[in-house]
Image (spheres, grey):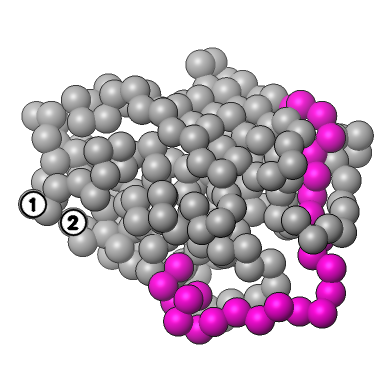
């Protein structure tokens, strides 16, 4: 088992990389700066190769939805892969944020890749007591204070950095489909559990998807 894979998988999906080998010497992918941007930079530095084989996609054929209270996620047929996301956190710097992005023509790298993960100050010590986020700090996460501010002296990279990062997490989790997607995804107050539940529900319904070869 390998942990914290979503930022790396999102960078690969956002860069349209669907054939690669990743080698790790640990049980966790490095957090780096808490965003997907360092992985994008590594991919660009390494370069890519077009293979002499058709690209395969998983095309969604019908609408599928999962919900848990006020958390909801829906996937529906589309010609391209796009995500619409709403988050709602009870913190003055976050609140309700919405953003949509189509994962094409470099939009992932330009619009969302640099957005960092975030956590509340009150969550830090309990997680460390569990042996988690040992490498976490202000250089790889936004830390929100209980007074309504943030601990990071450099501030935010975007006014809506929080919802942009949530889109990174969604893309990374949906990489569990195993193929690039042709679908529209709508998420409201979702989290990793909702994301993976959607993947399972779609894959367990043979009428909800098909694999196609395409030049999209």
The residue indicated by pointer 1 is 153
Q: Quadrant of residue 14?
A: bottom right
Q: Position of residue 167 (x, y in %)?
A: 48, 43
Q: In the depicted view, which residue is nearer to us: 107 or 3?
A: 107
Badge number at residue 175? none
Q: Quadrant of residue 90?
A: top left
Left or right, 42 with respect to 212, comes to: left
Q: Which residues are magenta?
A: 40-64
Disc 2 element: loop
Q: Residue furthest top?
A: 69
Quick one: quadrant of the C terminus?
Answer: bottom right
Point 53% across, 32% down: residue:
84
Is the C-beta separation of discs 2 and 1 under 8 Å? yes
Quick one: quadrant of the N terminus?
Answer: bottom right
- Tag nearer the camera, 2 or 1: 1
Point 79% across, 39% down: residue:
60
The residue indicated by pointer 2 is 138
The residues tagged by marks 2 and 1 sit, at their Cα atoms, a distance apart of: 9 Å
Left or right, 206 with respect to 121, comes to: right
């Amino acid at each position: 088992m390998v942990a914290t894979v979503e930022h790396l998988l999102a960078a690969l999906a956002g860069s349209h990389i669907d054939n690669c080998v990743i080698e790790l010497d640990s049980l966790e992918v490095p957090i780096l700066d808490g965003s997907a941007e360092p992985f994008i930079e590594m991919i660009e530095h390494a370069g890519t190769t077009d293979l002499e084989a058709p690209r395969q996609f998983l095309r969604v054929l019908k609408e599928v939805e999962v919900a848990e209270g006020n958390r909801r996620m829906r996937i529906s047929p589309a010609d391209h892969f796009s995500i619409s996301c709403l988050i709602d956190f009870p913190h003055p710097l976050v609140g309700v944020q919405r953003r949509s992005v189509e994962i094409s023509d470099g939009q992932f790298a330009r619009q969302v890749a640099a957005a960092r993960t975030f956590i509340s100050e009150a969550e830090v010590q309990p997680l460390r007591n569990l042996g988690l986020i040992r490498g976490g700090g202000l250089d790889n996460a936004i830390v929100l204070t209980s007074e309504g501010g943030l601990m990071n002296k450099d501030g935010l990279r975007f006014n809506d950095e929080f919802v942009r990062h949530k889109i990174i997490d969604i893309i990374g989790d949906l990489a569990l489909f195993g193929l690039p997607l042709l679908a529209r995804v709508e998420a409201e107050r979702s989290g990793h559990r909702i994301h993976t539940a959607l993947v399972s529900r779609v894959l367990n319904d043979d009428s909800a998807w098909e694999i196609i070869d395409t030049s999209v």
